Image (cartoon, rainbow, N blue to C red):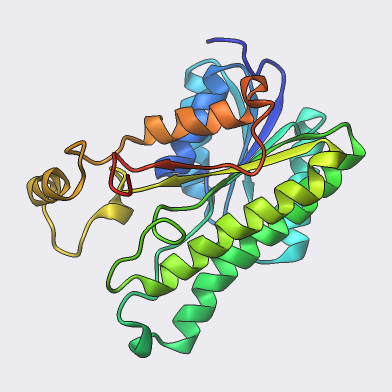
């Protein structure tokens, strides 16, 4: 356990698995009290258990960031449990609406935009509202190298949603740095989670595809994304505002 975030309160959305869980664990290892949020209770409870087994403090908060009342409640409950909100990480997202643009169902498109874009907006709205009234804080949004930095066939809707997250991050960063709220984003490429796999693809097939597609020769580790998030949330990044840190093994270099 280290003390870079000792006694700070951190809210992580989408914290029940994958990148979100790794981020929550990393903050806890560095002394933070972590509120882990998501729509499903069971995986959140598993994340909390892992944190507590390592000697950290955490609480699971169920809620849906696409609902403004839920987004506000998550902030309120994190503050009530830990006495404040110093850092928020908006990681909740989906990769749905796959296929050519002309074939995307309207309902699939709307769900993707609701979760990835509107969910990030509503989460930030209430996080910023608390932070600017209580001395400031730091927010990190999880975007993607698909969007502003890269396009690919069959994931156009997802790329649009993540490009919007990047633009929203930069707009909010300019709007609220004077309030003491410092906002940045990370944009991972392929990361070793189920989301980066293709239907029916084995682990060996995925590894071979990563060797061919990613200059560094592999998918990223969730811990590598978490390390970047913690840097952007830390005092060491105090002069970093509105950045979009790409973590993709050289894919968009």
> Please, which residue is most extreme toward the front here?
253
Count of numbered tags: 0
The C terminus - image quarter: top left
* Depth order, front residue of 193/142: 142
Question: Image check: 132 left or right of 82?
Answer: right
Q: Residue 110 occupies which quadrant of the picture?
A: bottom right
Q: Residue 231 occupies which quadrant of the picture?
A: top right
In the displayed structure, 139 sits above or below 115; it is: above
* Depth order, front residue of 136/6: 136
Residue 91 seen: yes
Q: Position of residue 65 (x, y in %)?
A: 65, 59
> Please, which residue is most extreme toward the right here?
133
Give me the residue at 79% from left, 51% from top: 175
In the displayed structure, 157 sits above or below 240; it is: below
Give me the residue at 59% from left, 65% from top: 117
Give me the residue at 64% from left, 33% from top: 240
* Depth order, front residue of 19/52: 19
Q: Position of residue 180 (x, y in %)?
A: 83, 35
Q: Position of residue 60 (x, y in %)?
A: 61, 41
> Please, which residue is most extreme toward the top here?
2
Give me the residue at 20% from left, 61% from top: 198
Residue 46 seen: no
Q: Residue 239 occupies which quadrant of the picture?
A: top right
């Amino acid at each position: 356990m280290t003390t870079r975030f000792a006694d700070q309160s951190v809210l992580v959305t989408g914290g029940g698995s994958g990148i979100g869980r790794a981020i929550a664990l990393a903050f806890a290892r560095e002394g933070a009290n972590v509120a882990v949020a998501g729509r499903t209770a069971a995986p959140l409870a598993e994340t909390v258990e892992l944190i507590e087994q390592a000697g950290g403090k955490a609480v699971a908060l169920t809620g849906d960031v696409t609902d403004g009342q839920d987004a506000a409640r998550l902030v309120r409950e994190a503050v009530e449990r830990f006495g404040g909100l110093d850092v928020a990480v908006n990681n909740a997202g989906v990769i749905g609406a796959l296929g050519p643009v002309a074939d995307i169902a309207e309902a699939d498109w709307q769900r993707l935009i609701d979760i990835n874009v509107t969910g990030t907006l509503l989460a930030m709205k209430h996080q910023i509202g608390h932070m600017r009234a209580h001395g400031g804080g730091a927010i990190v949004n999880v975007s993607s190298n698909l969007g502003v930095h890269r396009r690919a066939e069959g994931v156009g809707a997802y790329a649009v949603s993540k490009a919007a997250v990047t633009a929203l991050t930069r707009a909010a960063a300019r709007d609220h740095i004077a309030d003491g709220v410092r906002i940045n984003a990370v944009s991972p490429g392929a990361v070793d989670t189920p989301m980066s796999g293709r239907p029916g693809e084995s682990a060996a097939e995925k590894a071979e595809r990563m060797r061919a597609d990613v200059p560094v020769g592999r998918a990223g580790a969730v811990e590598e994304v978490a390390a970047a998030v913690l840097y952007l949330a830390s005092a060491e990044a105090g002069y970093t505002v509105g950045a979009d840190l790409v973590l993709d093994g050289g894919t968009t270099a």
